[in-house]
């Protein structure tokens, strides 16, 4: 048996994440307080993540436990602390384990605000670690083979689980290592290796050849499936060469081993011709495996064994048996024994898992409770409003009839006891100054809320404009979630608060109108008793002297007080009637994995508040009968004599002012509390938006840098070249003028100096030696005599020196660096640094024309220059 060669999957790597700040902010904002218990749970969660994904795990089954615990914890907290871009802003980054690191961009990665993304990558690492543990098992022992088979089966099952979860739970396109093609190929390879482990166990247990053949044939089929999946261009180009070579080679190897075992069986059954045919097939398969496996998988010993068996079988058949050797299609196919099965991971993955955030209710339950409380509060306010509206109507009726003051004012000089009691109640509550102070606070509180709303809307609009500008700039490369989509819920929340604030403003107008109507009466009631008596006009008693009518009205007034008292009791019951609805929501969530909060809330509200709503309806209906009785009795009271007077009108206004004072005081106190609570909610909403915008801006800066780097890498600017590859036309046109000014000819003036590189040391200053007379210049040369030769100053960037006396130099305007001149004449005497050999210069151009720079390898016709540089000058 050849050496067992298996493959394993590398673990994915991730970056550290600060989990405390995002969780603390979310818990404080959503649940109101971040307790010490929460802080301890967050610290434990951070340690759990570090142990699971930041440390290199042990290649033992005990090394899986931290991954199991972390996965279970992620699953448990997903409903309570949803990790997303708008909730708990934990940004997880995971790297592609199969991709190679690029020179500038590093290893490909993907970052998402998603607990599902984190769980999927943790599951991938669980499967990868299973493959690594299986690979290092002892394949020469029964226990090692069983463990390897079990672990490879688990790896295959988990890779399939990851494939099923990726496109269901991830909100964006996954990176290549999490693609369906890649995960399905990994699962196929792991399952094939599990079947291979079982094949090796059949060999170790010395099972019969037919069994070994069937197990080997199934192994070959599984490797064939894996090789077909790996052949996908999206998969093959990313995996290591040894990974692909081993899988493709084993496809042929195990098909060959199946034929070999079946040939052994034919040999034992005296089917010598068929055994030779199967040995030949086996030898071809295994030889093909040796070629495909390159240096990574070489079944040389098995190939030699099959060769020996084939040679011996052919020799025996030729000498002894002379059996007919059948063609491959004439032999019965080998059966298959599919023993390996992909085993998915059961949940919870660890028996030791516990929820660190057990004290926090799931956000689904929290939101359902919040909706229930909103419905409950609306119901209570509606019923209380019905009671108060009915009471206001009753008080208005009594005030218009001057009751009960009319039946108490018998002397005309003293104020009724009921009015004195009302005045005392006003004074003990702070008087008119208290109501005025509360009323003056409302505009400031209201303006504060408007400013918070306006600023929050401005922040979202500004961020959305920036995101739109980036989307227009980078177009389809700007793939992050649009701001309009991200802020949809926040804009709806702001619109809701704006509508609430508009309604509150209208209610404030009604309150101020009532204040303006009764401010004089409230001011009068706020005075002392003596001042109040002096302020009320005196007069005779009004009304009938019939004691029966007075007694009837007094009885009706007692009924009015009884109705008011019962309404106070009903209102208190409405406000105090509470129930722990979260328990019902939790039961529904555990039973159905969902919460039908609307039906549960309606049923609970009907059960709790139905009887109280009936009491409110009965009280309102009873009042109508009571008012009719009061009007009838009062009519009989005033028909017995007496007339209305200024005193009676003042007493009515004072009674109405008392009722208005009590109502205004309560309404203004509730209004102040309402605005304060609304400010707290608006600031909380603004804080969420501000944190989200800050994170978005930080993410935008990183995203822009990454895109600019990628764009710069994919379309780099062309580097400057020393010589532009241009053709040399026979009749060259005049050189195009540069941007600055027309370029003079070399004979007219030196070229303009572009930007200078770092200064170089000047050449050695030596006096030129006398030289022999030079030959006259050729006919093409300019008529002006060339200047005497002298050493020149250091050349600048792209600057060429003037030609020497009697020589010709063709500058290259495209050269980015100074170019040493090439002069005519024989090579100078002595040693010259950098001398590369003698080169003939090109012939000078006709007067007024330039030759373009020569292309690489092209030389203009040589012309013997008339002179050489002075002896001893070094370039």
Image: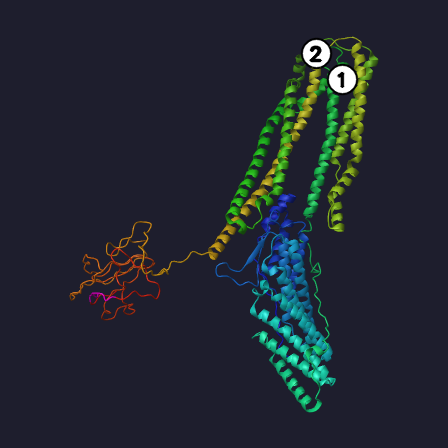
Q: Which quarter of the rendering shows the N terminus? A: bottom right
Report the predominant secondary structure element of the magenta stretch: loop
Q: Please state the horizontal and vertical placement of residue 752, each as a whole percent of the image.
A: 28, 53
Q: Residue furthest bottom?
A: 319
Task: Write down the region rendered in magenta.
Answer: 863-870
Question: Is 150 colored magenta in this rendering?
Answer: no
In the figure, is residue 686 to the left or right of 270? left
Question: Residue 378, relative to residue 316: is it above or below?
Answer: above
What scheme was used to colour the molecule? rainbow
Position of 307 relative to 173 (above/below):
below
Residue ID at (76%, 39%): 602
User: Where does the image place residue 505, in percent across and percent down from the top left?
Assistant: 62, 29
Instruction: State the mark number for residue 647.
Output: 2
Q: Is residue 865 magenta?
A: yes
Q: Which residue is mark 1?
A: 404
Callout 2 touching callout 1 (CB < 8 Å): no
Residue 656 figure quarter: top right
- Badge 2 local density, few (<14 within 10 Å), some, or many (20+)? some
Q: Where is residue 29? Give x, y as percent.
A: 62, 43
What is the distance, in whole Å, between disc 2 and disc 1 at their CAs? Answer: 14 Å
Helix or strand or loop: what does disc 1 sit on?
A: loop
**Occupied quadrant, residue 455:** top right
Q: Nearer the viewer, residue 859 or 115?
A: 859
């Amino acid at each position: 048996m050849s050496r067992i060669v298996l493959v394993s999957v590398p673990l994915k790597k991730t970056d550290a994440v600060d989990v405390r700040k995002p969780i603390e902010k979310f818990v404080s904002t959503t649940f109101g307080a971040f307790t010490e218990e929460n802080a301890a749970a967050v610290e434990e969660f951070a340690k759990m993540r570090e142990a699971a994904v930041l440390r290199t795990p042990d290649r033992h089954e005990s090394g899986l436990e931290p991954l199991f615990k972390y996965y279970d914890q992620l699953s448990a907290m997903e409903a309570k602390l949803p990790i997303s871009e708008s909730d708990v802003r934990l940004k997880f980054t995971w790297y592609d384990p199969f991709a190679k690191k690029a020179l500038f961009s590093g290893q490909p990665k993907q970052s998402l605000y998603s607990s599902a993304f984190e769980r999927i990558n943790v599951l991938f690492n669980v499967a990868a670690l299973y493959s690594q543990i299986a690979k290092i098992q002892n394949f020469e022992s029964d226990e090692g083979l069983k463990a390897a088979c079990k672990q490879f089966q688990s790896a295959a099952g988990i890779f399939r689980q990851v494939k099923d979860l990726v496109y269901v739970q991830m909100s964006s396109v996954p990176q290549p290592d999490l693609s369906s093609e890649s995960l399905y190929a990994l699962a196929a390879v792991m399952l094939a290796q599990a079947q291979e482990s079982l094949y090796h166990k059949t060999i170790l247990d010395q099972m019969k050849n037919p069994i070994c053949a069937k197990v080997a044939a199934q192994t070959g089929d599984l490797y064939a499936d894996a090789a077909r999946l790996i052949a996908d261009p999206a998969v093959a180009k990313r995996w290591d060469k040894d990974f692909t070579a081993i899988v493709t080679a084993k496809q042929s190897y195990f098909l060959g081993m199946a034929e070999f075992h079946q040939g052994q069986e034919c040999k034992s059954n005296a089917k010598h011709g068929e055994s030779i045919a199967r040995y030949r097939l086996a030898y071809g398969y295994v030889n093909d495996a040796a070629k495909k496996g390159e240096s990574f998988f070489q079944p040389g010993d098995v190939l030699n064994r099959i060769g020996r068996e084939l040679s011996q079988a052919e020799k025996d058949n030729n000498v002894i048996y002379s059996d007919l050797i059948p063609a491959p299609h004439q032999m019965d196919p080998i059966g298959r024994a599919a023993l390996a099965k992909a085993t998915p991971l059961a949940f919870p993955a660890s028996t030791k898992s516990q929820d660190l955030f057990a004290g926090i209710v799931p956000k689904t339950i929290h939101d359902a409770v919040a909706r229930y409380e909103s419905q409950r509060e609306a119901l209570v306010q509606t019923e209380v409003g019905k009671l108060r509206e009915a009471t206001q109507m009753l008080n208005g009726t009594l005030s218009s009839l001057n009751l009960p003051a009319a039946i108490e004012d018998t002397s005309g000089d003293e104020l009724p006891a009921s009015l004195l009691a009302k005045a005392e109640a006003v004074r003990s509550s702070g008087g008119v100054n208290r109501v005025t102070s509360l009323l003056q606070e409302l505009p400031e509180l209201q303006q504060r809320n408007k400013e918070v709303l306006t600023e929050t809307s401005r922040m979202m609009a500004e961020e959305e404009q920036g995101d739109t500008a980036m989307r227009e700039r980078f177009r389809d490369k700007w793939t992050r979630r649009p701001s309009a989509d991200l802020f949809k819920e926040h804009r709806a929340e702001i619109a809701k608060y704006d509508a609430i604030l508009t309604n509150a403003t209208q209610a404030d107008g009604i309150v101020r109108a009532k204040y303006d109507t009764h401010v004089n009466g409230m001011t009068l009631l706020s005075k002392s008793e003596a001042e109040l008596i002096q302020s009320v006009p005196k007069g005779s008693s009004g009304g009938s002297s019939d004691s029966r009518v007075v007694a009837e009205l007094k009885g009706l007034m007692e009924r009015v007080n009884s109705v008011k008292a019962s309404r106070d009791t009903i209102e208190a019951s409405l406000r105090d009637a509470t129930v722990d609805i979260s328990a019902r929501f939790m039961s529904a969530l555990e039973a159905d994995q969902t919460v039908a909060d609307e039906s549960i809330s309606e049923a609970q509200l009907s059960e709790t508040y139905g009887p109280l709503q009936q009491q409110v309806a009965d009280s309102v209906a009873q009042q109508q009968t009571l008012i009719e009785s009061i009007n009838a009795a009062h009519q009989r009271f005033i028909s017995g004599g007496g007339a209305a007077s200024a005193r009676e009108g003042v007493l009515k206004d004072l009674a109405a002012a008392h009722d208005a004072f009590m109502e205004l005081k309560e309404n203004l106190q509730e209004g102040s509390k309402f605005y304060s609570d609304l400010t707290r909610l608006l600031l909380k909403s603004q804080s969420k938006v501000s944190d989200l915008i800050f994170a978005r801006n930080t993410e935008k800066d990183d995203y822009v840098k990454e895109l600019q780097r990628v764009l710069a890498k994919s379309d780099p600017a062309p580097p400057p070249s020393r010589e532009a590859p241009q053709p040399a036309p026979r009749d060259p046109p005049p050189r195009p003028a540069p941007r600055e000014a027309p370029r003079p000819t070399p004979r007219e003036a030196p070229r303009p100096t572009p930007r200078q590189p770092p200064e170089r040391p000047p050449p050695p200053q030596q006096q030129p030696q006398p030289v022999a007379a030079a030959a006259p210049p050729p006919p093409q040369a300019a008529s002006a005599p060339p200047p005497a030769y002298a050493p020149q100053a250091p050349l600048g960037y792209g600057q060429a020196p003037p030609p020497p006396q009697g020589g010709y130099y063709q500058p290259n305007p495209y050269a980015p660096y100074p170019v040493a001149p090439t002069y005519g004449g024989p090579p100078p005497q002595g040693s010259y640094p950098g001398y590369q050999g003698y080169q003939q210069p090109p012939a000078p151009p006709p007067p007024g024309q330039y030759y373009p720079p020569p292309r690489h390898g092209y030389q203009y016709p040589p012309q013997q220059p008339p002179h050489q540089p002075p002896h001893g000058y070094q370039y």
